[in-house]
Amino acid sequence: SYKKQAQDINQKVTNPDPNSLVQSSIWAGQISLLQGSYNDAIGHYQCALTTQQKYLLPNHPSIASTYNHLARAYYK
C-alpha cells in the first residue's frame, strides 16, 4: 500500500527526524483507523509511542496524545 511505502521510505532516511517518524506513524494510524484496520492502526500508534518514549519525557503531552489514539483504536 502507499502508506506502507511512504513509511518505509521515511524510515530509511539516513538521519530520520524522530518527530517526522512519529508524525508519519500517527497519520498512518489515523488512515488505518478510518479504513477499519484497527490492528494496523494500533501497530502504527505503538511505533509512534516507542519513538516518543526514546526522545521525550514520560509526562510529555505528545505521549498522552498517542495514548489517546491507542485507546480509540482499542475501543473500536
Image (tube, rainbow, N blue to C red):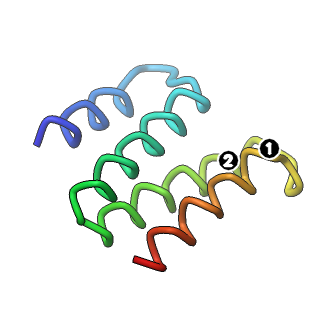
Lateral position of residue 55 relative to residue 25, left or right: right
The residue sitting at 34% across, 29% down in the picture is 12
Q: Which label belongs to residue 27?
A: none
Extreme residue in the left direction? 1
User: Residue 75, relative to residue 18: is it above or below?
Assistant: below
Quadrant (top left, top right, bottom left, bottom right) of the C terminus? bottom left
Marker count (numbered): 2
User: Residue 25, relative to residue 47: is it above or below?
Assistant: above
Lateral position of residue 42 relative to residue 61, left or right: left
When asked about the image quadrant of residue 35, the answer is bottom left
- Of the residues shown, which amino acid type is indicated by label 1? Leu
Whether pointer 1 and pointer 2 mark residues with C-beta atoms closer than 8 Å, the reply is yes
User: Residue 54, relative to residue 15: is it above or below?
Assistant: below
Q: Determine the CA span between mark 1 and mark 2.
A: 6 Å
The residue sitting at 35% across, 44% down in the picture is 28
- Nearer-the-camera pick, 20 or 11: 20
Lateral position of residue 76 relative to residue 18, left or right: left
- Nearer-the-camera pick, 59 or 55: 59
Lateral position of residue 73 relative to residue 12, left or right: right
Label 1, on which residue? 56
Residue 58 horizontal/vertical position (percent): 85, 57
The residue sitting at 80% across, 44% down in the picture is 56
Extreme residue in the top direction? 14
- Of the residues shown, which amino acid type is indicated by label 2? Gln
Residue 68 horizontal/vertical position (percent): 63, 62
| Crowdedness near tag 1: few (<14), some (14–19) or many (≥20) residues, C-alpha within 10 Å | few
Label 2, on which residue? 52
Residue 1 horizontal/vertical position (percent): 10, 43
**Is disc 1 placed on a helix, strand or loop?**
loop
**Is disc 2 placed on a helix, strand or loop?**
helix
